[in-house]
Amino acid sequence: MSSLNAAENLWHCYNCGVRSLLTRRLTTVLALLISAACFNSCSKRSPSAFAITHVTVINVTGAAPQRDSTVIVSGGQIIAVGAADTIAIPRDAKVMDARGKFLIPGLADMHLHLTGAGEPTGSREFILPLLIANGITTVRDMGGRVEYLKGLRSEIESAQRLGPQIFFTGPYLDGDPPAFQPSVVIRNKAEAAATVEQLKSAGVDFIKTQSHLGREGYFAIAEECRAQNIRFVGHVPDTVSAAEASAAGQTSIEHLTGVLVATSTREQELRREQLASGPPNESVSAAIQRSRGWQRKLLESLSTQKAARLLQEFARNHTWQVPTFPTLVHMGFLTPQMDLRGDPWEKYVPSKVQQIWEQGRKTQMENRNDVDFALRAEIIKRSLEIVGKMNEAGVPIMAGTDAAAPNVFPGFSLHEDLFYLVKAGLKPMQALQAATVKPAQFLERNGEQGSVAAGKRADLVLLDANPLEDIRNTQRIRAVVVNGRLLERRDLDELLTGVERYAKAH
């Protein structure tokens, strides 16, 4: 199992036992009521119509920003966008003067797990408010129970609860034994056909593949998804090459699984070793030494020519990439320099979740030395380089975090992912597109969302500074509009305060 998979397994296993760990003390109940009251009251404050005036609109189309613009929102839609002196403001509309500020579409986190802190309260009181407070209005959940995710989505769509649009995959389709739960083991065509049909009927948006799938199971899933007209996404299994996954029609590859190996001149040898188990009774130090040798071999054999051919395949097949740099940097290939223990954002993380995070950090750090950390840092460097080359080659890229994996803070980490995309070589506009218009295209909702235009869904983020000058300015949020609901800075601060109260009680 890769270091990334091992780290993910820690927090996925937590979900199975989280209910038994929750207490029923009166203080906990009161904290839940306080935070829920704040979250739900914020969702009902927006007037029926409002205008954001004299703002600079960054429409993520690549066109120049539209200065001194007015945007009218009513009934969950953008009604009008244009020069401030040409737009008539409805008489009953609330007016927000946004001189000196910048308006972008709502952001999308295209890889997270809403059940990463337990269900149902963990998602509702911890993850959802942090997403909204950080301007995230669309998410793609990449592994959870269908009935829970459908219920959560229904609450949001019926305005019972404030939250982002949710698209989801449901359980993982994996080999035997599976890496995480909830999973369905797929070994052959019959199992693939039955499971894909069942999940599609249950209402999932995508099918997700996992790392332990055998070749027969993986290609059976690919065939069934084509036959049943549903897209499949996820990990490239260890038994399958990244090029094969792209050719088979996998719509998105997560965490760059299999990508660096596929650019090695020793790819077949490395993949055989990746699948091989260590000798019986292998010591921890021997296993680490074996992993260290594998990583050295990988880094020493990377080929620019193989990379170019692979990226041509990705671009030709329109194989999307979701690198999820926050989980790669802060967990999968963790080094002491990149550990976020003690980060100010930890005050928003429930103590029981922090315990799981600490276990994940310990697993990734213990018995490692400076040689291991240098190898990890080099793998991150090469990962950044390959994403930059993907962008140059026309491979579509989306932003995602893998929250709430250890060291990956819901909401906040998406802004960090945008920073890493720019570090990889994307321009700030391209990084913004990876979290706005590109997800809209991927979700086949480009006509409904992803840009600031009349007729589009009113998901917007108002910023105090220009993200095209510094992508970190996406964190300087003045207001968020979620499906037409206006949350100003004081409302967003109330959400954060509610999460902090919840975290202290749990």
Image: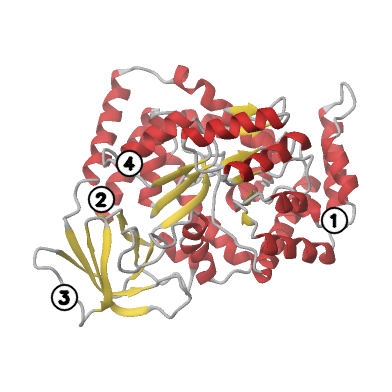
Q: Nearer the viewer, residue 480 or 361?
A: 480
Circle 3 is placed at which residue position? 88
Give the mark count.
4
- Contact between marks 3 and 2 (CB within 8 A): the answer is no
Q: Residue at left 14%, top 64%?
A: 93
Circle 2 is placed at which residue position? 491
Instruction: Provide residue 491's location: percent of width, then percent of height.
Output: 25, 50
Circle 1 is placed at which residue position? 264
Q: Residue at left 48%, top 76%?
A: 62
Q: What's the distance in space between the residues labelled 4 and 1, CA to CA?
A: 45 Å
Q: Residue furthest bottom?
A: 85
| Of pointers 3 and 1, the one earlier in the residue sequence | 3
| Of pointers 2 and 1, the one earlier in the residue sequence | 1
Q: Amino acid at mark 2?
A: Asp
Q: Residues within 10 Å of mark 3 (few under 14, many from 20)?
A: few
Q: Nearer the viewer, mark 3 or mark 2?
A: 3
Residue 156 circle label: 4
Q: What's the distance in space between the residues labelled 3 and 1, CA to CA?
A: 59 Å
| Of pointers 4 and 3, the one earlier in the residue sequence | 3
